[in-house]
C-alpha cells in the first residue's frame, strides 16, 4: 500500500547495526520518502534515532511500529514530547470486519478474535493463542519490562482473560495467581502498557451511592477470552459480554481513554459505558445484541445525577440509526462506527 516507502525490520541484526549510527544512516536516505521502522523497540536507543529524525530531518516522515506503548518502556530515554503522534491499532473493529474483510458473522468475529490472520481462517487454531501468549511474554514483557517470573505473570494474564469484563479484585487475583498484591498491580501495569489489557474506571462525582474505586478489566481481544475460557462456540449467554469488548474498541478508536468509564451504584444498577464529553455532558452507551431488551432503570438513576448528555444503544444488527423513547428517555439505536448515530459524532 506504500510503494515509495523504505521498510526496515528492526528484528534483523543487519538493520540494528545500520542504525547504530542514525546520523550516518539518515544522510543517505531520501528526505521525501517515508521510512518505516518496524519493531522499533528492538533498537538499543530507539528514541535517539527518532529524535534525530524529528530535529534534523523535518521533511522525512517516519512510521515507527511496535507491539507496545513504546514511549512508556524503559528503552525510551526521551519522551519525544511535541515530536510524535501515537496511533493505537486495535484488533479488527466490527465495522471493519463487515466492510474490509466481508465477514458479517458476529459469532465468528467474537470466537476467532480480531487479529487478521485468525479472523480470516476458516478453522480456529487453538494452538495459535498459546503460542502468541508465550511470544508476548518473551518479546514484550521479559525484554522490555524485565519481568522474570514467567509462570506467575502468565498465570495472572490468563486469569484476567478469563475474567475479562469484570471488576478488578486485587485480593482475589493475588490469591488465585500466587502473587502478592503489589506484584499483581505491577504486572497489570506492564500488561496495560503492552496493550494486553485495558482498565475502565468507574464514573462518579463523589456520590455516596456510586461505585468509586474498582475498575473493570478488559482483555485486548475476544478470541483470547474465548480461548482461555475454553469456548469453542458462542452461546446466547456469552454473546453480550463479548459484544461489550467490540463496543469498547470502537469507543477507544475515537475517544481518549481518560474520557471512557462505566457506571454502577451500590444497588447493582449499571451502565456499560459512559463517555465524558465536557464538564457537564455525559453520554451513556448500553451494549445490546437485541436493542428490544433494553432496560432503562440504570439510565434513569444516572440521569438524576447527570442530566446532560445523549443516550445510545449499540447493537450489531442495526443498519440505519434510529431514535426510540423508553421510560421518558430518548435513545439513539446504532451500530459501532455508524453515521450519524455513533457517539463519536459531536
Image: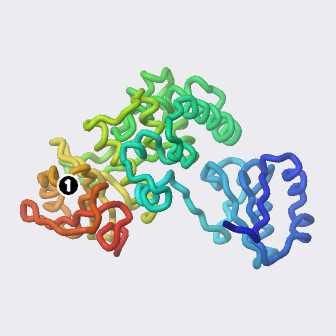
Q: How many marks?
A: 1
- Residue 255 at what x, y percent from top left? 42, 64
When the figure is inspected, residue 178 is found, relative to residue 121, above or below; the finding is: above
Residue 263 seen by the camera: no
Q: Quadrant of residue 235?
A: top left
Horizontal placement of 305 versus 86: left or right? left
- Residue 205 at what x, y percent from top left? 26, 57
Horizontal placement of 102 versus 84: left or right? left
**Which image quadrant: the N terminus?**
bottom right
- Residue 11 at what x, y percent from top left? 78, 46
**Which image quadrant: the C terminus?**
bottom left
Give the camera-side residue of 21 and 241.
241
- Residue 192 at what x, y percent from top left? 52, 45
Residue 245 seen by the camera: yes
The residue shown at (70%, 60%) is: 64
Dot 1 corresponds to which residue? 291
The residue shown at (61%, 49%) is: 68
When the figure is inspected, residue 143 is found, relative to residue 83, above or below; the finding is: above
Give the residue furthest to the left.
327
The local secondary structure at tag 1 comes to helix
When the figure is inspected, residue 23 is found, relative to residue 265, above or below; the finding is: below
Q: How is the image coloured?
A: rainbow
Give the camera-side residue of 316 and 224.
316
The residue shown at (43%, 54%) is: 249
Horizontal placement of 125 versus 254: left or right? right
Q: Characterize the local packing of mark 1: few (<14), some (14-19) or many (20 or more) Cα atoms within 10 angstroms.
A: some
The residue shown at (49%, 48%) is: 114
Amino acid at each position: 500500500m506504500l510503494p515509495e516507502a523504505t521498510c526496515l525490520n528492526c528484528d534483523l541484526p543487519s538493520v540494528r547495526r545500520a542504525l547504530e549510527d542514525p546520523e550516518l544512516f539518515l544522510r543517505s536516505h531520501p528526505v521525501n520518502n517515508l521510512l518505516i521502522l518496524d519493531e522499533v523497540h528492538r533498537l538499543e536507543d530507539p528514541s535517539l534515532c527518532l529524535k534525530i529524525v524529528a530535529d534534523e530531518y523535518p521533511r522525512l516522515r517516519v512510521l515507527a511500529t511496535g507491539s507496545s506503548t513504546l514511549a512508556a518502556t524503559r528503552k525510551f530515554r526521551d519522551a519525544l514530547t511535541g515530536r510524535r503522534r501515537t496511533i493505537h491499532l486495535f484488533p479488527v473493529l466490527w465495522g471493519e470486519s463487515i466492510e474490509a474483510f466481508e465477514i458479517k458473522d458476529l459469532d465468528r468475529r467474537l470466537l476467532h478474535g480480531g487479529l487478521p490472520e485468525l479472523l480470516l481462517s476458516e478453522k480456529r487454531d487453538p494452538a495459535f493463542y498459546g503460542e502468541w501468549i508465550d511470544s508476548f511474554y518473551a518479546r514484550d514483557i521479559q525484554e522490555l519490562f524485565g519481568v522474570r517470573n514467567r509462570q506467575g505473570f502468565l498465570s495472572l494474564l490468563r486469569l484476567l482473560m478469563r475474567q475479562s469484563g469484570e471488576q478488578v479484585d486485587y485480593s482475589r487475583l493475588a490469591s488465585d495467581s500466587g502473587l502478592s498484591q503489589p506484584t499483581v498491580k505491577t504486572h497489570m501495569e506492564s500488561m496495560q502498557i503492552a496493550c494486553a489489557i485495558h482498565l475502565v474506571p468507574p464514573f462518579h462525582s463523589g456520590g455516596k451511592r456510586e461505585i468509586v474505586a474498582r475498575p473493570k478489566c478488559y482483555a485486548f481481544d475476544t478470541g483470547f477470552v474465548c480461548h482461555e475460557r475454553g469456548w469453542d462456540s458462542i452461546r446466547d449467554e456469552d454473546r453480550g459480554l463479548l459484544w461489550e469488548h467490540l463496543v469498547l474498541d470502537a469507543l477507544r478508536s475515537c475517544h481518549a481513554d481518560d474520557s471512557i468509564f462505566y457506571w454502577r451504584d451500590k444497588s447493582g444498577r449499571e451502565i456499560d459505558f459512559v463517555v465524558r464529553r465536557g464538564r457537564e455532558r455525559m453520554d451513556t452507551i448500553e451494549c445490546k445484541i437485541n436493542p428490544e431488551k433494553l432496560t432503562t432503570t440504570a439510565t434513569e438513576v444516572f440521569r438524576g445525577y447527570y442530566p446532560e448528555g445523549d443516550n445510545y444503544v449499540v447493537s450489531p444488527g442495526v443498519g440505519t440509526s434510529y431514535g426510540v423513547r423508553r421510560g421518558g428517555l430518548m435513545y439513539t439505536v446504532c451500530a459501532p462506527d455508524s453515521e450519524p448515530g455513533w457517539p463519536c459524532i459531536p
